[in-house]
Amino acid sequence: MSRTSFTIWAAMFYKYISMGGYILRYRSHEMATALEAKIRDAGGRIAFNTRVDKIIVKGGAVAGVETSHGERIATEHVIANVSPTVVYNRLIYPREEVPPVAYQNVNARKHGLSGFVVFLGLNQPPEKLGLKDYGYFVYDNTANPDILNQKFSDLYGNRIQAAICLNNATGSQTAQAHQPGAGAAGGI
């Protein structure tokens, strides 16, 4: 947390404590589906389960991509869902097309926290499993405040899990903002 702006962190934390967290009506699946539809409506192509190995650049402009299947696809636009570090250090082809300032910019960055999402289906109602709230933070050691504080500072050994039970968060799966006093909100 030493690299986090205290002002921004404090503002977010204050809003979280005073107003609670928010649960969106639509989740990542609906957002991805809507984005896919817009891309296809505009004449774009989406290839699932296909890795891009090269972003082909000619004269400083994107000319296409080469997939892991060896297919070359001509395009003037690429949306990359990897970090700029990966794009400029591994994907741009030929390497001479990467502007020196891009290397300086991405290689000067410090990488932050990363995370992933796992969706689990419950085979029983949340109440029967003892899930009364919708947000839970799970730590491997909460006995020592110094250890707990260190976990928020360590980018590599962080063993903190945030869990949300959507049934308790949204009730009927409709859009609702968490109301203060209704329990803890989940998510880091």
Image (cartoon, grey):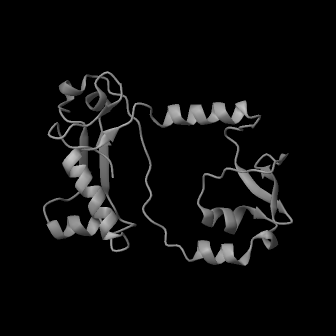
**Does residue 4 appear left or right of residue 58 in this picture?**
left
Q: Name the residue nearer the viewer: 26 or 148.
A: 26
The image position of residue 17, as x and y in percent, is 20, 51
Q: Quadrant of residue 101?
A: bottom right
Q: Residue at x 71, y 32 (%)?
A: 40
Count of labels in the image: 0
The image position of residue 61, as x and y in percent, is 81, 61
Q: Quadrant of residue 9?
A: bottom left
Residue 93 visible:
yes
Residue 153 visible:
no
Residue 96 to residue 118: above or below: below
The image position of residue 15, as x and y in percent, is 26, 52
Residue 134 to residue 84: above or below: above
The image position of residue 81, as x and y in percent, is 60, 51
Q: Residue at x 38, y 33 (%)?
A: 120
Q: Name the residue nearer the viewer: 40 or 54.
A: 40
**Does residue 140 appear left or right of residue 84 in this picture?**
left
Q: Residue at x 61, y 74 (%)?
A: 105
Quarter of the figure that contains the N terminus = bottom left
Q: Quadrant of residue 151?
A: bottom left
**Does residue 137 appear left or right of residue 44 in this picture?**
left
**Does residue 35 appear left or right of residue 70 in this picture?**
left
